[in-house]
């Protein structure tokens, strides 16, 4: 099994910054595309950013120029640097990863989420 654990969420004032981390552990042969998603209560989960194993990135228009996704393959860890935060960035942020196991099977996993609250 694979576990994804997010950390780094919290309360910050508008204009401030936070750095989220997502650490993967368990039986991992390789981690392919990883991503950050976010969700408000009663709403659909939405894409924030993704990063491939060779660090090709993709961002939602709403966060371009403010958020930066990165990863450390040696540590099986992904990051999201969030700058110039706005109240509308208040969500639970979830980590997602496609993990290849020792037998070649690839499955997607989700973390349990970390809450980011931006006050005005």
Image (cartoon, rainbow, N blue to C red):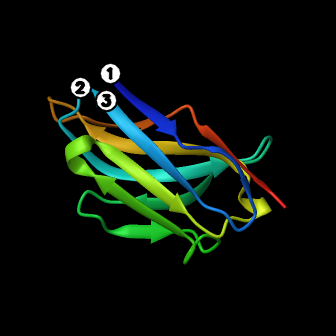
Helix, strand or loop under label 3 = strand
In the picture of the structure, the residue carrying the numbered disc 2 is 27
> Of label 3 and label 1, which has the lower sequence position?
1
Asked if residue 45 shows in the view, the reply is no
Along the line of sight, which residue is nearer the eye, 98 or 9?
A: 9
Along the line of sight, which residue is nearer the eye, 110 or 66?
A: 66
Q: How many marks?
A: 3
| Horizontal side, residue 83 vs residue 95: left or right | right
**Location of residue 8 in the rendering, given as x and y in whole percent from the top left corner:** 54, 43
For image coordinates 19% across by 46% down, the residue present is 74
User: Where is residue 66, by image quadrant?
Assistant: bottom right
At label 1, counting other C-alpha atoms closer than 10 Å, the crowd grade (few under 14, some 14-19, many 20 or more) is: few
Label 3 to label 2, Cα distance in Å? 7 Å
Asked if residue 101 shows in the view, the reply is yes
**Location of residue 116 in the rendering, given as x and y in whole percent from the top left corner:** 67, 47
| Horizontal side, residue 118 vs residue 27: left or right | right
At label 3, counting other C-alpha atoms closer than 10 Å, the crowd grade (few under 14, some 14-19, many 20 or more) is: some
In the picture of the structure, the residue carrying the numbered disc 3 is 25
Label 1 to label 2, Cα distance in Å? 6 Å
Which mark is drawn over residue 1? 1
**Location of residue 62 in the rendering, given as x and y in whole percent from the top left corner:** 65, 71
User: Where is residue 1, by image quadrant?
Assistant: top left
Q: Which quadrant is home to the C terminus?
A: bottom right
């Amino acid at each position: 099994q694979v576990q994804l654990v997010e950390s780094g969420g919290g309360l910050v004032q508008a204009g401030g910054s936070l750095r989220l981390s997502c650490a993967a552990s368990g039986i991992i042969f390789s981690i392919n595309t990883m991503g950050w998603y976010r969700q408000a209560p009663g709403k659909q989960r939405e894409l924030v950013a993704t990063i491939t194993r060779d660090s090709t990135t993709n961002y939602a228009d709403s966060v371009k120029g403010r958020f930066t996704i990165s990863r450390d393959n040696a540590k099986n860890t992904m990051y999201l640097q969030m700058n110039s935060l706005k109240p509308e960035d208040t969500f639970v942020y979830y980590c997602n990863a496609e993990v290849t196991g020792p037998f070649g099977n690839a499955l997607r996993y989700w973390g349990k989420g970390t809450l980011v609250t931006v006050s005005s």
